[in-house]
Every structure is written in structure tokens, then in C-alpha cells.
Image (cartoon, rainbow, N blue to C red):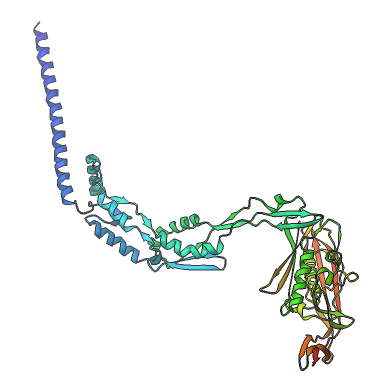
């Protein structure tokens, strides 16, 4: 019985001791919390208008700085890079803008606001934690950057206008073996502004750390596909340009220009079947006043005279050049009697072809295995005729040699012819002198590594005199 009485008081003493320790700890914790809170309140009051000590931005100390001082600090950092040049380039298009004009660099306003408000939220525990971390071990904030969107858009506007192009849907319709409407599809393109901004943003740290003087940023362009491609618009295999010919007809009289337009319209839209022998004169049809042609100067019986359809050979010459460049098999071609100045405005001699309905023709064979479409285009501002051949490329390539000019002979003396339709005393030049010569050039056409055409075109031009009309009308 005595032993039991001794155990009970001992347990009671242990319980009372533990209880005392518990309340002591609670009191100590409360006291510590109150002390920390009181200390933080004093700390917060002391630093209410400045950034807490120990806070850095991009390892730049901003502690104990006011918001305005932080703004000024990073404004100076931006001043140090304001001469940095950003060059944007696309092919031959290049433009440069400075970091100052782009307002490129630290976002000093946002950085200052973030720094001054850090640790000053409504959450007391969070604020204490941030203040302690900053004070005892330091707290580094990641910086924010910016540039002026308005300055960027204004600077980039000319690029966008120059580069952006809407895609073009193909148009294709034909009737009675002739294409009435044809317009090949064209890819569009647009400046990838978001990608450029992404590249610009990626330069912030490099510029601010290394402070280079020049940064080159490529202009990214996105390709826009048309909804209706040329392939989808037709089932004849006409999908790409396989040859083009051009010529100039500057200083042509009005009637000659009219005839060039009319003849070009006659062959425009011509559709040539696989293995078909195409005849230029057959496609062109009768050339006379009855078919709408006007009188212009032609070569007939060794003389330059006014005749129906003067200028048609401008079209046949241009067509011949398109056939040469396309690598097609030319089965008939005739050179002019003498070197005509029109055909050498943008070409060396020898690249001409005359036609005279119905006997003198220009022919070729469509040996591509697909249809060929003829399209003509006249640029009045340049006085230029272009002929495009569309089809499907079979991989053939063309090499044209430079022409060799031999057997040169000087032009005969000038010729004056009386013209009763011109007022007396009027002199009008209707033909220009040209030396006689023999002109030759080679053409080699290769397909799949094998030469399929190897030929020489020879033109024998007679010497030609200048011709003047002398008015005799009283």
C-alpha cells in the first residue's frame, strides 16, 4: 500500500511539469511572433517608401531605393544601349532603327512597381518571409523588358506593304479548243510579324549584357497557299510556265501597235494538244483589212510599203523566242529579209521569225506529252510584248549560244521615194539602214541527261538602205 501511494504523486508531478513546459513554449512562440511582428512593423514603417534591403533586379541592387530612383536607375541602363542598331533584312530590302527610337530595353516603370511592392501585400506571413529572405540571403528578381509597339508598327509598315501579297486563285475555262479564261494560281506571302517580334524579344539579354552596336534580325515571311491551285482548276496538265518570249516595239506607229495587239489576241488562249504540229499562220488566220488589220509598213518584193497587218511579225518573232526558251521542237522558221531594228531593241540579231499568210509559217511540235497553253501580254508603258507558254515541265533544259555575225556588208545609199499623199516639202523616214550579214546561233536541249535537240539557226540578211518618203502634194 505504501508503494502505490508513492507512484501516484510522481505521475502527478510529471503531468504538471509537461503542462508547464507546453504553456511555456506557447508563450515563447507567441512572444517570438509578437517580437517578429513588432520588429517587422518597425521594419515595414522604416522601408515603407523604399524597396526592401537585399532585393536585386537582374543582380542590380535596388534595395533602399525609392520607386522613382529605381525607374531612373534602369532608365540609365537603357541610355547605355540606345545607340544599338537593329537591322531588319529581306533580300535587297534593308532598314535600320535604333534602340532609342524603338524604346527598346528594360521596362523601368514595371520593374520599379514590382520592386517597391514586393513584400508589401496584405498577407503578413508572406511579407515577413519575403523580407527575411531578402535581408538575410538576398532576393533577385527577373527583369521585364519592352519596346514600343507603336514605334515597331510604324517602322515595319513599309515592309508589310512591300512584301504582303494575297494568294490568287486559278481561273481556267475553255470552249471549242480555245482557252477563254486563264489565270494561273499564285502563292501569297505575308510578313511573319509575330516571329520577328519573337526574334526581337530574344535579343534583350544579349543587348543589355554585351551591349553590341549592331543586331541583324531576318524578316520572316509566311507563304499563303491559294484555295484553288492551277492543278485543281484544270485537268489538262497545264500547271506551270515552261517558256517565255519577249520583244520591244518602241517607236512603232499607232497602226503597227494596233496590229500587234490584234495579232497577239488571235493566238492568246490557243490550246495545243500533245504531239500536235502548231501552225502560227493557221491559228492567226487571214491578215487583211477584212479581218480588222490596219495598214502599217511591211516588206514586200524588196520594198518597205504600207500594207495590211504590218506588225504581225512582232508577234511571230516573240513566239519564236518563247519556243526557243521552252526547248520545243521547231519544225519551220524563216528569218526576215533584212535586220529589223524593232527586233534588236532587246535582243541580239538572229532571234526573229517572219510569217506571211498563208505560205511563210512558223511551226513547232508539242512533244512534251501534255497540253500547252499560249498566253500573250502587252505592256503599253514599256512597249513590250510577252508570250507565255504554260504546260507541264518534263525536265528539259536549254542552252542558247551567243550569235555569230559574219559576211558583213554595208548598207546601200539612202533611197528617196516620191509620195503624193504627203505635202510638198515633207520628208518622212519609213525605213532604216541595216548592214547585210549572216547570223547563226546554236541551241542544245537536254532531257534526263540526254541531248534531244542540237541545231543551228542561220539567218541571211540582205543589206538594207534607209528609205525616205518625199512629199509631192501641192
- Image quarter of the C terminus: bottom right
Q: Look at 23% across and 45% down and name the residue there.
A: 132
In the image, is 356 to the left or to the right of 154?
right
Q: Quadrant of residue 98?
A: bottom left
- Furthest residue in direction top, as rendered: 1
Q: Look at 44% across and 67% down and name the residue there.
A: 97
x, y (%) of residue 365? 85, 61
x, y (%) of residue 96? 47, 68
Instruction: Please determine whether, in this image, residue 440 is positioned above or below residue 18.
Output: below
Is residue 410 in view from this perspective? Answer: no
Q: Quadrant of residue 151?
A: bottom left
- Furthest residue in direction front, as rendered: 474
In the image, is 117 to the left or to the right of 426?
left
Of 130 and 251, which appears nearest the observer? 251
- Image quarter of the N terminus: top left
Of 221 and 470, which appears nearest the observer? 470
x, y (%) of residue 243? 75, 64
Q: Look at 28% across and 53% down and name the residue there.
A: 113
Instruction: Please determine whether, in this image, residue 135 is positioned above or below residue 125.
Output: below
Q: Look at 56% across and 60% down and name the residue there.
A: 164
Amino acid at each position: 500500500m505504501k508503494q502505490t501511494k508513492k507512484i501516484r504523486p510522481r505521475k502527478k508531478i510529471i503531468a504538471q511539469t509537461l503542462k508547464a513546459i507546453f504553456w511555456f513554449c506557447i508563450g515563447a512562440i507567441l512572444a517570438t511572433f509578437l517580437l517578429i511582428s513588432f520588429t517587422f512593423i518597425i521594419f515595414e514603417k522604416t522601408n515603407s517608401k523604399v524597396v526592401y534591403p537585399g532585393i536585386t533586379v537582374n543582380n542590380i541592387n535596388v534595395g533602399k531605393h525609392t520607386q522613382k530612383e529605381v525607374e531612373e536607375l534602369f532608365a540609365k541602363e537603357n541610355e547605355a544601349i540606345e545607340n544599338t542598331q537593329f537591322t531588319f533584312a529581306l533580300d535587297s530590302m534593308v532598314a535600320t532603327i535604333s534602340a532609342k527610337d524603338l524604346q527598346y530595353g528594360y521596362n523601368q516603370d514595371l520593374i520599379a512597381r514590382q520592386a517597391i511592392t514586393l513584400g508589401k501585400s496584405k498577407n503578413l506571413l508572406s511579407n515577413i518571409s519575403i523580407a527575411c529572405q531578402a535581408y538575410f540571403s538576398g532576393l533577385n528578381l527577373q527583369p521585364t523588358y519592352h519596346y514600343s509597339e507603336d514605334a515597331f508598327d510604324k517602322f515595319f509598315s513599309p515592309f508589310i506593304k512591300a512584301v504582303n501579297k494575297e494568294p490568287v486563285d486559278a481561273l481556267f475555262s475553255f470552249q471549242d479548243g480555245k482557252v477563254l479564261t486563264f489565270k494561273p494560281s499564285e502563292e501569297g506571302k505575308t510578313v511573319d510579324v509575330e516571329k520577328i517580334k519573337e526574334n526581337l524579344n530574344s535579343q534583350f539579354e544579349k543587348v543589355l549584357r554585351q551591349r553590341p552596336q549592331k543586331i541583324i534580325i531576318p524578316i520572316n515571311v509566311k507563304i499563303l497557299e491559294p484555295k484553288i491551285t492551277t492543278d485543281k482548276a484544270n485537268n489538262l496538265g497545264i500547271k506551270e510556265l515552261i517558256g517565255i518570249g519577249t520583244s520591244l516595239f518602241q517607236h512603232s506607229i499607232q497602226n503597227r501597235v494596233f496590229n500587234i495587239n490584234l495579232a497577239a489576241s488571235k493566238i492568246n488562249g490557243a490550246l495545243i494538244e500533245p504531239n500536235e504540229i502548231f501552225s502560227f499562220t493557221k491559228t492567226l488566220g487571214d491578215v487583211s483589212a477584212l479581218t480588222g488589220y490596219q495598214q502599217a509598213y511591211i516588206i514586200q518584193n524588196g520594198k518597205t510599203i504600207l500594207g495590211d497587218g504590218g506588225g504581225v511579225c512582232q508577234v511571230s518573232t516573240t513566239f519564236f523566242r518563247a519556243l526557243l526558251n521552252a526547248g520545243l521542237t521547231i519544225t519551220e522558221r524563216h528569218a526576215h529579209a533584212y535586220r529589223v531594228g524593232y527586233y534588236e531593241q532587246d535582243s541580239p540579231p538572229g532571234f526573229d521569225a517572219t510569217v506571211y499568210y498563208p505560205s511563210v509559217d512558223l511551226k513547232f511540235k508539242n512533244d512534251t506529252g501534255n497540253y500547252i497553253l499560249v498566253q500573250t501580254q502587252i505592256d503599253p508603258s514599256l512597249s513590250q510584248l510577252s508570250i507565255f507558254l504554260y504546260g507541264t515541265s518534263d525536265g528539259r533544259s536549254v542552252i542558247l549560244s551567243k550569235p555569230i555575225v559574219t559576211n558583213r556588208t554595208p548598207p546601200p545609199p539612202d533611197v528617196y521615194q516620191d509620195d503624193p499623199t504627203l505635202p510638198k516639202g515633207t520628208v518622212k523616214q519609213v525605213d532604216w539602214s541595216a548592214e547585210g550579214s549572216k547570223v547563226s546561233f546554236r541551241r542544245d536541249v537536254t532531257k534526263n541527261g540526254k541531248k534531244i535537240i542540237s541545231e543551228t539557226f542561220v539567218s541571211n540578211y540582205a543589206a538594207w538602205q534607209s528609205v525616205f518618203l518625199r512629199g509631192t502634194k501641192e
